[in-house]
């Protein structure tokens, strides 16, 4: 779970965080779930809600995969 665009760029160099956040991406033997960096939530209500939604989606993904 890379946090923010710099962390995500290591795994997905051609993706943008705006397009990829909150989505489960399969890459060879990895599952990648990029999210906005937590500090992004400090920018305002809209950013905080987007960050919260990403983490709620992550919870659903982990439950679906039997990890939680």
Image (tube, rainbow, N blue to C red):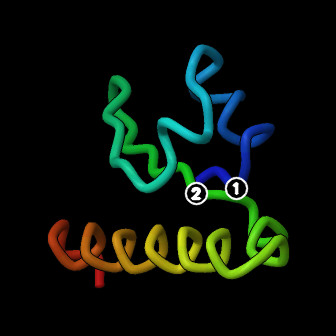
Q: Give above or below for 57 relative to 26.
A: below
Disc 1 from disc 2: Cα separation: 5 Å
Q: Going 30% across and 72% down the picture, which residue do you hit?
A: 62
Residue 42 is left or right of residue 25, and the answer is right
* Helix, strand or loop status at disc 2: loop
Residue 17: percent from left, percent from top:
61, 39
Q: Give above or below for 13 relative to 51.
A: above
Residue 47: percent from left, percent from top:
67, 69
Q: Nearer the viewer, residue 66 or 44?
A: 44
Residue 2: percent from left, percent from top:
64, 50
Q: Please say if the residues under marks 1 and 2 sit with CB atoms less than 8 Å apart.
A: yes
Tag 2: Cα neighbours inside 10 Å, few (<14), some, or many (≥20)? many
* Helix, strand or loop status at disc 1: loop
Residue 35: percent from left, percent from top:
58, 57
Residue 30 is left or right of residue 47, and the answer is left
| Quadrant (top left/top right/bottom left/bottom right) for the C terminus | bottom left
Q: Nearer the viewer, residue 16 or 59?
A: 16
Residue underneath mark 2: 35
Q: Going 59% across and 14% down the picture, which residue do you hit?
A: 14
Q: Give above or below for 15 relative to 23.
A: above
Q: Going 70% across and 56% down the picture, which residue do you hit?
A: 3
Residue underneath mark 1: 3
Q: Could you say which quadrant of the image residue 18 lies in?
A: top right
Q: Could you say which quadrant of the image residue 25 lies in?
A: top left
Residue 47 is left or right of residue 67, and the answer is right
**Sequence-first disc among 1 and 2:** 1
């Amino acid at each position: 779970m890379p946090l923010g665009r710099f962390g995500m760029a290591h795994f997905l160099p051609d993706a943008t965080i705006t397009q990829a956040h909150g989505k489960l991406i399969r890459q060879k033997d990895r599952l990648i779930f990029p999210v906005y960096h937590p500090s992004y939530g400090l920018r305002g209500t809209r950013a905080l809600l987007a960050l919260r939604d990403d983490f709620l989606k992550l919870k659903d993904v982990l439950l679906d995969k039997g990890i939680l």
